[in-house]
Image (cartoon, rainbow, N blue to C red):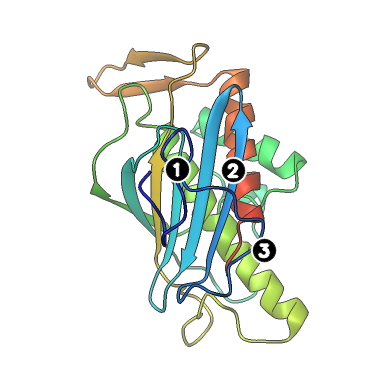
Amino acid sequence: MSKVNGSSDSEYGAPQVRAAASSSLPIPTRHVARTILGHDTHVVCQSFTDRICIFISQVGKLGCIMQATVSTPAHFQPSSSDLDFDDEEEITMARDARASSIPLLLPSTSLQTLLGSPPHGYSTLYPLMASHVASLVTTQATSSSKVGGRPSTMDMAAGGNTSRPIIISLGLRRLASSQSAVDEDGEDAFESSEEEQVRFHEILQMVSEASVW
């Protein structure tokens, strides 16, 4: 990942850890870094007037860039009934997320790939993780506004059902325990491993800690 707002580069080319959002920067920015399963992992979150940008990298550079837009009814509370029970991968990840206090995937999450594409074998994981990141951001922002009695930093539109788009860049290293296959349509089919689920939840926790919303 290239330098962010003039911060110094680490061994992997990613900015050094910022324990809190920097008040000296014109754009609210927070950076969290830690090692996950032996891989240096960096999460940088920035809040713009019309977008929230979240950069997640284990490869020292930008990865597949997606835009998520979340639309939910006012006072919506996610539950297991909103999950796609035909998607075993989604159910497994969501069940573990619920056990670790991570918000469940919100319905009506629109995801669009802007640049790049997931690596071979990760065409399921990347959109799934991006959707969960968007749900986490939206849920946290809405909850904090209710607790603090102030308008949500997600700038919910009239009726409280549409949030700012969230730009998510994902660049993950391949785990040895992850397996890929090709389904009948010739597309990548992701097979989850225990390590992959650990990384999934660790990254969501890092995004939560890097909150600028």
For the residues bearing labels 2 and 1, Cβ distance under 8 angstroms: yes
> Image point 64% across, 54% down: which residue?
208
Residue with the mark numbered 3: 77
Q: Which mark is residue 33?
A: 2
Q: Nearer the viewer, mark 2 or mark 3?
A: 2
Tell me the SS state at disc 2.
Answer: strand
Query: Is 41 drawn above or below residue 159 in the view shown?
Result: above
Instruction: Decide if residue 118 is on the left or right side of residue 94.
Output: left
Which residue type does callout 1 highlight?
Ala
Which residue type does callout 2 highlight?
Ala
Give the image location of residue 24, x and y in percent: 54, 74
Q: Earlier in the sequence, mark 2 or mark 1?
A: 1
Residue with the mark numbered 1: 14
Work out which quarter of the rendered image holds the C terminus and state it.
Answer: bottom right
> Image point 55% across, 72% down: which residue?
73
> Crowding at label 2, few (<14), some or many (≥20) Cα neighbours within 10 Å?
many
Residue 61: in sight, yes or no?
yes
Q: Nearer the viewer, residue 64 or 210?
A: 210
Residue 92: in sight, yes or no?
no
Q: What's the CA distance linking mark 2 and mark 3?
A: 30 Å
